[in-house]
Amino acid sequence: MEGISSLDEMTCESREGLGVATAVMLEGAQMTRFLDDVNAEIDAIDDFPAETELPVIEELGRTDAVISIAVTGPDDPVALKAYAEHLKSKLLTQEKIAEVTINGFSDHHIRIEIPAWRLRQYGLSAQDVANAIGRHSISTPAGRLEGDREEILLRFDDQRKQVDDFYDLVVISGSSGATIRLGDIARITDRFDRDEEKISFNGQRAAVLNIAKTRSQDILNVLARVETFVARENLTAPEGLQLTLTQDRASVVQDRLDMLVRNGAQGLVAVFFVLWLFFSFRYSFWVTMGLPVSFLGALFILPVIGVTINMISMVGLLIGIGLLMDDAIVIAENIASRMAKGDKPLQAAITGVRQVLPGIASSFATTLLVFGSLAFITGDIGQILRIMPMVLIMVISVSLLEAFLILPHHLSHSLAHMNRKRVSRFRERFETGFDHLREAFFGPLLDRAIEYRYMTLGIVLMLLILAVAMPVGGKLKFVGFPDLDGDVIEARVLLPQGTPLAHTESIVHEITTALQRTNQAFLQQQPEQQPLVENITVIYGQNPDAYETGPHVARVVADLLSAEIRNAKLDDVINRWRHETGVLTDVISVKFTEPTFGPGGRPIDLRLMGYDLARLKQASNELQDWLNAHQGVNDLSDDLRPGKREYRLHLKPGAGVLGLNAQQVAEQVRASYQGIKIDEFPVGPETYEVNLRLIADDRTDAEDLYNLSITGPGGSLIPLSVVADIEEVRGWARINRVNRQRTVTLQGDVDRSKANAQELLALAKSSFIPELLERYPDIQFDIQGESKESAKTGQSIVRNVLLGLVGVYMLLALQFKGYLAPITVMIVIPSALIGVIFGHMALGLDLTMPSIVGMASLFGVVVNDSILLVVFIRDHRAAGIPVVVAAKQAGRARFRPILLTSISTIAGLSPLLLEKSLQAQILIPLAASIAFGLTAATLVALFLVPAVYCILDDFNLIGKLHDETDEEIAAGATTSSPGP
């Protein structure tokens, strides 16, 4: 597959009995074409070994897990599996349920086991018995009878499909008529292949049905279907059978959406209250009505561009509650201002809209440029976060149409109604108080800022440098993606290869006991003392972190009380469970984690690449020792581990004299210990395999292997040790390659209350890794996981936002007819960083990728007030007013709308900032960036923009006004008084 186009990375792993190649497509390429190319290349391979099964090619990530159903009751696993298959068939008939898989069972076998002494007694090999069964258990077409009236099909049908059918099958028949039947020499059972593939649910043997959905399906609809199905089946299930919902990944989605809807409603009320303070009730009502109109319009368009209702798109709508009001408030405030100057209602609406049209159109274009650039950010984190600017673009576009085409008409009627109504005492007092605030407090401060404009600029630059110093100096930590509490946690157990199932079960018992102690420790904190741990599922034979299967691995999965109900953070529960478990003997690793990681990946995910596995392992151990020496590093391990002990057989030179070759010996050994697949047939929804091998007591240790009899020509029995040398070795459990290089991957977690993954990895790269690579020059080092994804998305944000800002600059340069005039507007953009940094520090938050996206989104918003402020200064300047006076007048004129738009945006986000829900932790940094960044940018816009405008005028760098010639500009510059 190396030559496939759009191939980003190829990972190949080999382990016992299995090889897996994973091809990662370049972001943005077409999956259909990529998959066709992979299929074509694999189909062209014609030199697979003879015993290799046909390769299975599938696209990963096509479905998402929704919820699981645990079925408990029968102790007989065969009966339990049959009932689970029955439930699966019924579930798949339900609408909108795409995929159901059954866990807890391995392949279904009719197992035929023969003692070795029986084979020696009759001079048989396992292959001889298998051939005899295959000859007698057949079902095949036998032709047809073609009569004049009817055509009849013929079939020879003597296929055995039940255990009892095999007992009387003749294996040996003598010339005297004596026969040896299979039931005389073999034990025949209906069972599952591997004992370790089982699941325990709250202490009972269980079948678990995992329900998944496609990307286009609604997870909440699927959840509702499953809940209804389980409730109905529990009413009609046989006595003793119980269906229980577990590993619920969908209810938390409903909790998050409910939280966002609640915050959205509170934000809408807060925005309306702010508007009511400045306008009348009727006036505020029509301004606020633009929100539902904009939301409905956006919700109509979003499905067309592939955006669903999810947590991030809902956040986009929530942020839009504050941002959408900007244009409507500017229009409404200007119409009211025209009305106060004596215009009639209709004329006030028309003139007011026309006056702010250029500024609003320009601010909309700048917002669109920045949000549009964010809609194309890359990386796994970027794929999620870019939905928010896409939502905001749609909402703001609809809002702009509503604000210009619909809102003025309603406001003109409201103003006409207000003229006939006496102004209330509250309104008079509020307006008087606000005018006093503007003239007595803000006005003098603005005058002082303009007069001492160079000091004003210096203060802002000082604060900006101080803000940048906070993250650079380590006072503010960076985390790729904030923790998001779910309702499921698990412990992943890894023991040495070859560990028997009984020992794994004893270790699992210790871990589940520790989980019960953890449950008791948190019991008193929970509402009404509800149990924190609702269900415990033990899955044997699986460990996603180990990339291994077998009796030496297991998962202990705990369903917790809903995050919206419980009074415990997920990290606290995991840390307590880890503490209660303590140090376990004979265990390679136990990782306590959530079932899935966020889009950022693992905090620690490092690769060492080379060709010598032994040296890779040595380097990995040294790196692990260095990382484990730092407090806060948990569950660190690599994926290169010793495999099981292995006996390798080599044919002796003299074996040919006995009439044996390597293939004959290998086939007989394989038949005895791995088993022979004799037949395979479907029974209902299941597929049964008829398998023959030696009885379990003859497959326990090396002595059994040495005593195995190989059947030679003529039926002679020859001990295996006579024809083969047996060598004991130990290989590796798994070998992994990334882009053709052997690779060892180290993965671990970091307790964010004790350490920061970004700082830890930066320290490793600067201090330890160079020394390590110096000792191992044949090894390469690479960082993956959260750090790499954060860097990838961060770089795309910086690149795209810079391109967007270039577009903003060009747009403003055209509007203001000068290359330096846009600086007066764009200077507020970096000032937003002041609020973002100090806001995060005030709330005790880490800087995250959602914070960065929120700050970048703010760049397209903060310039809006500055644009209108500069437009008003230029309008006053065009009327012949000196620049300094024009700046002071424009600042006072724009104080009310600038303050109102900022307060309304912050009010819309305030419920989310104050949200205590665990589900809001991913959103609070984003909201904090916008709220605090906007606060800082508002103050800068009010004081710094007029000051910088006057500074540029001091040097005659303002640029042309739309109706001035160069001579008039120069003349105007001489009349303006420079600041001290």
Image (cartoon, grey):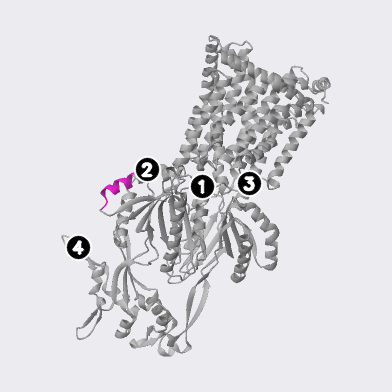
In the rendering, at what x and y percent does residue 225 appear?
A: 35, 44
How far apart are the alpha carbons under marks 3 and 4? 73 Å
- Residue depth check, mark 3 versus mark 4: number of the one nearer the observer: 3
What quarter of the picture does the N terminus occupy?
Answer: bottom right
> Where are the magenta residues, as a range?
228-238
- Relative to 342, is 129 on the left or the right? left
| Residue at which label 2 appears | 224
Outermost front residue: 524
Question: Alpha-carbon distance for marks 3 and 1?
Answer: 28 Å
Give the residue drawn at x 61%, y 27%: 901
Q: Of callouts 2 and 1, which one flags the residue occurring earlier in the amino acid sequence?
A: 2
Marks 2 and 1 close (CB-CB < 8 Å): no
Classify residue 896 by image quadrant. top right
Measure the C-alpha gap from mark 2 to mark 3.
38 Å
What residue is drawn where x is 82% and y is 25%?
A: 979
Other-residue count near label 4 (Cα within 10 Å), few / some / many at <14 / 14–19 / ≥20 = few
Residue at which label 3 appears: 794
Q: Nearer the viewer, residue 974 or 75?
A: 75
Q: Which residue is mark 1?
A: 569
| Residue 646 drawn above or below residue 424 | below
